[in-house]
Image: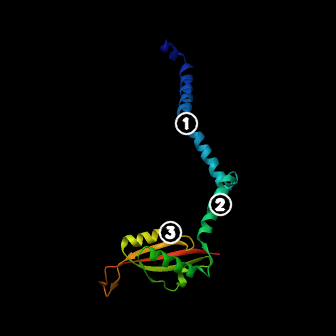
Amino acid sequence: MLIKLFKNKYAFPVAVVLFCCICYQAAFRKTLLAWRLNQQFKTELTAGAGAGAQPGFMLRKQKNLQLIADRYSLDSVGFRSAVITRTALIAGQRNITVKEIPEEAAALQTSSTAVERVNFAGGYANLLRALQDMERAGGIGMVRSVKFYLPRKGGQQAGQTLEMSVYLQAIKK
């Protein structure tokens, strides 16, 4: 029966076309639809139409950014005194010493941010706990950078006391 069907001169081209349609439906249709959808999303993204179509997302994003800015923004006049006061309290609670709070470096200051460096000395566990307390505490900015080191004099280790240098950054109001 099948052999008789293929002896017909029109049956083979019809079977090839039918086979191509089945292959298209099975494999290529979903791929081409996904490709077209991807192209549509790319054009919307470049045109900016995608951002306006999701006002709830933009409002949540703006709210989160405002919370972050409010948490780390401080008065630029009282920033240094707030850092001194709060870090001294944290150091006292964690049994470490505040070695120094050097004058602010001009290279670290910008028109919108203020940076203060605080140097501590003590045991490793106590320094880590103090660092965690500083990250949780409000009113001293955010911890930007931390450096642990052993003091050296003339290439030799000067003591067993570990030191920690912390850079705190705040957004100026």
Q: Nearer the viewer, residue 7 or 168?
A: 168
* Residue marked by disc 2: 63
Dot 2: element: helix
| Foreground label between 1 and 2 | 2
Instruction: Say which amino acid is labelled 3.
Output: Glu
At numbered mark 3, what does the secondary structure look like: helix, strand or loop?
helix
> x and y percent of residue 29 in the render?
57, 35
Viewer-nearest residue: 45 or 26: 45
x 46%, y 68%: residue: 132
Q: Amino acid at mark 1?
A: Phe
State the residue in front, 130 or 106.
130
**Residue 109 seen in the current view:** no
Per the image, the residue denoted by label 3 is 135
Q: Which mark is residue 141?
A: none
Q: Residue 78's quadrant in the figure?
A: bottom right
Position of 29 relative to 83 (above/below): above
Q: Residues within 10 Å of mark 2 (few under 14, many from 20)?
A: few
Mark 3 is surrounded, within 10 Å at the Cα level, by few (under 14), some (14 to 19) or many (20 or more) other residues, namely some
Judged from the image, the secondary structure of the residue bearing numbered disc 1 is helix
Question: In this view of the protein, which residue sits in the foreground, 7 or 161?
Answer: 161
**Mark closest to the chain's N terminus, 1 or 2:** 1
Residue 127 drawn at (x, y percent):
41, 73
Q: CA distance from mark 1 to mark 3?
A: 54 Å
- Determine the image quadrant of residue 18: top right
Q: CA distance from mark 1 to mark 2?
A: 43 Å
In this view of the protein, can residue 63 be seen by the observer? yes
**Residue identified by numbered label 1:** 28
What residue do we see at 62% from left, 60% from top? Answer: 64
In the rendering, at what x and y percent does residue 80 appear?
56, 81
Residue lying at the far front of the rendered structure: 93
